[in-house]
Every structure is written in C-alpha cells, then in structure tokens.
Amino acid sequence: MNIRHVTVADTENCGRVIYKAFCGIADKHNFPHDFPSLDAALQMAQMSIANPDIDGFVAEDDGQFLGSNFLWRQNRIAGVGPITVDPDAQARGVGRRLMQVVIERGKDASGIRLVQDAFNTTSMSLYASLGFDVVEPLVIMQGTPAGEASSQKAEVRPLEEKDFDACAELCRKAHGFDRDNELKLIIKMSPTFIAVRENRVVAYASAPTFWQMNHAVAETTEDMQSLLSGAARLTGQPLAFLLPTRQAKLFRWCLSQGLRVVKPMTLMAMGEYREPRGCFLPSVLY
Ligand SMILES: CC(C)(COP(=O)(O)OP(=O)(O)OC[C@H]1O[C@@H](n2cnc3c(N)ncnc32)[C@H](O)[C@@H]1OP(=O)(O)O)[C@@H](O)C(=O)NCCC(=O)NCCS
C-alpha cells in the first residue's frame, strides 16, 4: 500500500469513495445519508483538494484507489476528515495508515480533533487506539424552533465583517483559541449570524442550517437560544447543528421547541484540550 498527497486528478475517486463509504455505514445502521448525492460528495472532494489550508492524502495499492483523508489546518487546532476507505478495502489497515499520516502532518498543531458517528464501532476504536480521547457526546439536532427564545432576548442579525474581532474574542474565551480564518471563509458560503445584547456580541453561529460547517459560541445558554431562534426566523429554513448533550438545559430547550435528534456523534481530541466555557456547538471537525 502506498500513501501519497492528493492531487486534482484524484477528485473523482475521492468523491466516489466518500459517497460510497458514508452511505455504507449509514445504511448498515439505518441512519440518513450525510451526503445527499454523489455530486455533493464530489463537491466536498473538489473543495478540500483546492484549499491550500487542507492537506489531503490518498491510499492506493498497485494504482488502485483505496481511500483518502484530509487535515484542516486553518486554525491553531487542526481537524480531521472526511476519512473514507472503499468498503471493499475496509478492515485491512488502510484507515489506520491514513490516520497515522495526518497525525504526523498535524504534529506542529496545538491539537488535533475530529467528530465521528458514535455508532461506528470501527472508527471510534481506531481513533482511540491512535491516541484520541473521547471528550464530548454529541447529537445532530434538526428542525425549526416552535417559539421565541427566552425573556432575556438578544437581538439577532447577519454577521458582518466588523464583527470578526468580537467573534474571535468570544471563541477564545470559550475554547482558548479562535476560528477567525474559518469564519472568514464560511461567511462567503453560508448565512452566518450574531446575537447582540447590551451593545456587545454575545453569540455567533457560522452556518446554523448546515451542521457540517456550523460552529457556534455563546456567553450563556439563553444567548444561544436567542441566536438559534433568530437564525431560524431570518433564514426561514430548518436548523441543523451538532449539540453537545452534556449541555442539558440547551438539549431540553431544543426538544421542547420540537427539534429532533438525527444521530449520535462523538467529539474526540488529541493534544491540547480545555473544557469549554459558556455554551458552544462544534462543527463536523470540532
Ligand atoms: C472508519 C474507516 C475509515 C476505517 O478504515 P479501515 O481501513 O476499515 O480501518 P482499519 O482496518 O485500518 O482499522 C480498524 C481498526 O479498528 C479495530 N476495530 C474494528 N472494529 C472494532 C471493534 N468493534 N472494537 C474494537 N476495535 C475494532 C480493528 O481491529 C482495527 O484495529 P487494528 O489495526 O489494531 O487491527 C472505514 O471503515 C470507513 O471508511 N468507514 C465508513 C466511513 C466512515 O465512517 N468514516 C469515518 C468518519 S469519522
């Protein structure tokens, strides 16, 4: 087996295997597909390969494409994914090699994180055996909040360039690092929102209708509720986001608002990790 850097010529193989592998694990457990179509997976591959801040690797055997893995290095903390191995080549050590190469590539980052399907016994065991700790149980929540957030409402509006510094500061307070570079990229692709209370930014969400790309931070649970309600109202679309279920008050609020749990997932971390302060929602990376 040979591991090498991904090239543009690998786009089709990467997209095909990403689609096939994710459909395979979802179908096995009767969960909805992460990628609604082959086209969506191809777009994901294309975007990851084109971005200079994302390092991609492929595994091949005698020219036969076996799988790929990506390391996102936009911030001080690196994120892994998607990693996929062709279902015909799984359980033969390919995934382990693809993980080892991104761990090696990410060794100058302060930490490396990822999010996995909690029902995927293979990926959870593989990552744990390589040194990733389980740090947070998650669920994908989906739906439109039925009512208004709370009595202590913050005003919600689209995020503008002038808000970047305040958002970075919020994120640093919550996590000890910011996701400024990522936010500046996402704002071009997805509706992003902030909540303002007492003339200051108290919450932001980078893509609250698209769980893969969304991350959010809020000073309080009430601020997060205001932000989510406002984002649903302003987009007119159902929300979809990853929720750490240990945030019990927010979890119960989501359920009371009629949101539904789609599937369980797990946040795993290697290297620097600080228990988050305030309220947060992770993206598919961390
Ligand atoms: C997850 C995935 C990338 C792993 O790749 P793979 O090539 O099948 O994995 P490997 O064979 O390299 O390693 C699997 C390891 O998990 C271990 N394992 C598998 N099931 C296990 C279980 N139930 N309990 C404990 N260990 C288990 C295997 O023994 C192996 O460890 P070993 O190297 O010490 O023998 C691949 O299965 C895949 O593409 N799945 C579908 C897409 C997906 O879920 N991607 C991950 C998104 S987070």
Image: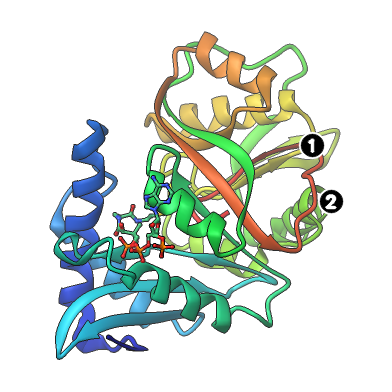
Rendered-image quadrant of the C terminus: bottom right
In the image, taking residue 143 as reference, residue 277 lies left or right, namely: right
Q: Secondary structure at mark 2?
A: helix
- Tag of residue 278: 1
Query: Which amino acid, mark 2?
Result: Lys
Residue beneath the point at 47% across and 49% down: 124
Asked whether 186 or 245 is in front, the reply is: 245
- At horizontal 46% and vertical 85% (from top left) the residue drawn is 52
Residues 150 and 30: in front is 30
Q: Which mark is residue 173?
A: 2
- Left or right side of 143 for 184: right
Observer-nearest of 176 and 230? 176
On screen, residue 84 above or below 233: below
The image position of residue 100, as x and y in percent, is 49, 76
Please state the horizontal and vertical placement of residue 191, each as a whole percent of the image: 47, 48
Q: Is residue 213 visible?
A: no
**Proximity of marks 2 and 1: CB atoms separated by less than 8 Å:** yes
Amino acid residing under circle 1? Gly
